[in-house]
Amino acid sequence: MAWKIGEVLPIIKQNVVDLIPEEELIEKLKKKDKIIVKYGADPSRPDLHLGHYVCLKKLKDLQDLGFSIVFIVGDFTAMIGDPTGRSKTRPRLTEEEVKENSRTYFEQVFKVLDREKTIVRYNSEWLARLTAKDIIEISSTYTVARMLERDDFAKRYKENIPISIHEFLYPIFQGYDSYAVHADIEVGGTDQVFNFLVAREIQKHFGEEPQVILTVPLLEGTDGKLKMSKSYDNYIGLTEKPEDIYGKVMSIPDTLIYKYYKLVLYYDDESLKKVESFIREDPRGAKAKLAYEIVKLLHSEEDAKRAEEHFNRVFREKKIPDNIPEFELPKEGLNIVEILYRSGLVTSKSEARRLINQRAVKLNGEPVTNIDTVLKRDGEKVLKVGKRKFLKLR
């Protein structure tokens, strides 16, 4: 295929932060008929989120241009855990956890990418077969001094926070992935530049032309501060319920509205000018439209309408939603912490106690302040946890 550089380059560069080095990309486009694009995701939790969607949308741009997309599920590297941005060692996942989390990945990926045109690989295919000799050879491509140039490693080293040897292997193995699939381009967030540079060195070591680095902006999560991450629990999952997606989008700070329109809804420059005016005049309206459009994008227009109605009923009109889950109280009654835990409203009893102490648990609209409270069968009761979770007690 003869790539028309003047036409494809602007598409490639849309919503991109880094293109390193651009001149190498142009050379690849001039001499290669097939451009292999690599994207990897570790199954640290079973769902992808809008931060991943930003990358997936860029991959769809490249796929539509005719580039070959290789999606790598990091089932092997997930058992190490990428320490990017961490101030401590990330907990390692078991093989069973990784397999369980991987199961739902593809239905989410193919909400964006063309299933028939996407190559899916697991990096355990090649990494699990490496011998000790192989690992020593690959590791020799990078020095400890260069590893410590990475921001999170440098910070932890300076502050005498432990760094495990296996964490140094993560960028090495991720770099080997690029060699294994012969990547011409790797796409990811801006926090991955160091890892992508390591990949270039490993490809050179094995006599292969190095990949071009293409990064997209990091999308801040619902807290408005940290990057959207499953580990930070500030994420909006691609397969979450429409009402939850809508509610979470409505909870983002106003300062993020424009960025979500740009990166998630992919508005062009002309449309973004109108969004800027909309935000200035009616930030809540702009956010409500954003929430509606994102639910429509990930589910359907009917789901978006229902989610909007649900949100307005619960949060604007302060009404209890329809069809909330129920929990049957025993005759002798039950402690509030036990109710929250057994009903599944919280994942642990310690979380239940914390939420009660934060006055985030309400009984019939009134905060529960005592963790020793026992609820009995004496009339209709509705528990509310945070802004979006309800439970009817029977």
Image (cartoon, rainbow, N blue to C red):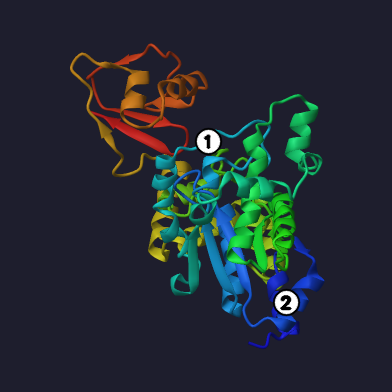
Toward which corner of the image does residue 389 lie, by quadrant? top left
Toward which corner of the image does residue 24 lie, by quadrant? bottom right
Front residue of 349 and 65: 65
- Above or below — where is 105 with respect to 228? below
Q: Which residue lies most toward the front here?
A: 133
Q: Quadrant of the C terminus?
A: top left
Residue pictured at 68% horizontal, 59% vertical: 216
Q: Which mark, by number, is residue 22?
A: none
Numbered label tally: 2
Q: Which residue lies most toward the top here?
A: 372
Question: Residue 55, percent across and down?
Answer: 60, 60
The answer to whether residue 100 shows anywhere in this view is yes
Lower position in the chain sequence, tag 1 or tag 2? 2
Residue annotated with mark 2: 28
Question: Residue 222, percent across and down?
Answer: 59, 44
Residue pictured at 45% horizontal, 44% vertical: 98
- In this rendering, position of residue 96 left or right of residue 375: right
Q: Which residue lies most toward the bottom here?
A: 2
- In this rendering, position of residue 165 left or right of residue 343: right
Q: Quadrant of the N terminus?
A: bottom right
Residue annotated with mark 1: 92
Question: Residue 380, percent across and down?
Answer: 26, 27
Amino acid type, mark 2: Lys
